[in-house]
Image (cartoon, rainbow, N blue to C red):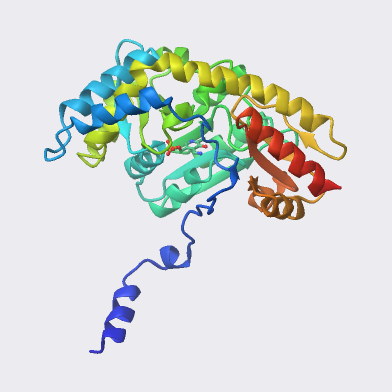
Amino acid sequence: MSPNQALIQALAQIRDDVRAAHAYPVASSAGMVKLDVMENPFRLSPELQAQLGQRLGAVAINRYPAEGTQRLAAALAAYAGMPAGCAITLGNGSDELITLLSMAVSKPGACVLSPEPSFVMYEMSARYQGLKYVGVPLREDFELDGPALLAAIHLHQPALIYLAYPNNPTGNLWDEALVEQIIQAAPGLVVMDEAYQPFAERDSMALLARYPQLLLMRTMSKFGLAGVRIGYLIGQQALVAEVDKLRPPFNISVLNAEAGLFALEHAEVYAAQAAELRAQRETLFKALQAMPGVQPFPSQGNMILTRVPDAPATFAALKARGVLVKNSSAAHPLLRNCLRITVGTVDENQALLAALKESLA
Ligand code: PMP
């Protein structure tokens, strides 16, 4: 057999849906004002960066991860205020936890449900595990469509429901009473994805004590460690233990665990950064609102979804001026002509506003 034929044969073993799919896009951003993926724009101070370097330098990288991961899990549980009776497990980013959750419920015919538009990995991950995915459109004002959601839950009996809280890309929180109605109606697991919790005025930790089917997912990414890859899942011990069985045993590297612990020891630095970004969000929102033809939507995250007259053209014009945002326009009919703008530093936000003004002229 020729090498070419061998390759064709090998590729033929790959699932048709995987071969037809596209990899998760990561935009190239070298040298740009990077406001596309809700990163924290602040680096550590040189002093803290040097201290972190020393800590990482002392880590034994010849051993598989062990106690460091457990210490990080305990530190995150304490930081988040994990209620009694609950347990925590860690993922290589919450992306990995989403994969584990899909695996955990992937019985034949099972279904995952989420309002949409929301975080794309819920659907991608469900489909890769052979699950049915049901997306229930939000209302035009991006609020949950309560009657449609409850009807879809009744009809499809989803094994797993995701509620991003605040939502990505719309940035809003859901009505608390409706969230509880959804949890009560759910025949299976409900995951509140609180990736943007550092920027939001409320969270759902208190609901864990009332609803054993509820899991809370958070990440250190938006906190300021997107490059380190640490997500965590908190819920009833029995439920978390099942998800944990599917976790690759050494998914958190010794370096990640040490960096995560270091960051939590300096939680006040990150809290100050989150406060600064919340303040900048309000300043940016007002500036966007004052621009003719521009409609920003109120946000509880570190991004502002913004409608402009022609999003693809504005996206390209911003890019040509060195400013990278996310063009969400094509992702969902409700997002027509919407750009998702991450809140950056004062200078980055000024650069965005100046480029936007030129782009719309
Ligand atoms: N959940 C939501 C709602 C997100 O927007 C994202 C990333 N943007 C994630 C989870 C994944 O975050 P990570 O894998 O970095 O923890």
From the viewer's perspective, tell me whether residue 237 is left or right of residue 349: left
Nearest to the observer: residue 184 or residue 143: 143
Q: Quadrant of residue 240?
A: top left
Nearest to the observer: residue 159 or residue 41: 41
Q: x and y percent of residue 11 in the render?
A: 34, 74
Quarter of the picture holding the N terminus: bottom left
Q: x and y percent of residue 303 in the render?
A: 62, 33
Visible residue check, residue 178: no
Nearest to the observer: residue 361 or residue 108: 361
Rendered position, 107 above or below 205: below
Total labels drawn: 0
From the viewer's perspective, tell me whether residue 66 is left or right of residue 80: left
From the viewer's perspective, tell me whether residue 147 is left or right of residue 96: right
Visible residue check, residue 14: yes
Residue at the extreme bottom of the image, as rendered: 1
Nearest to the observer: residue 234 or residue 219: 219
Rendered position, 39 above or below 209: below
Q: x and y percent of residue 29 in the render?
A: 54, 50
Residue at point 57% right, 27% down? 166
Q: Quadrant of residue 81?
A: top left
Q: x and y percent of residue 13 in the render?
A: 31, 71
Residue at the extreme top of the image, as rendered: 84
Residue at point 58% right, 44% down? 135
Residue at point 46% right, 20% down? 270
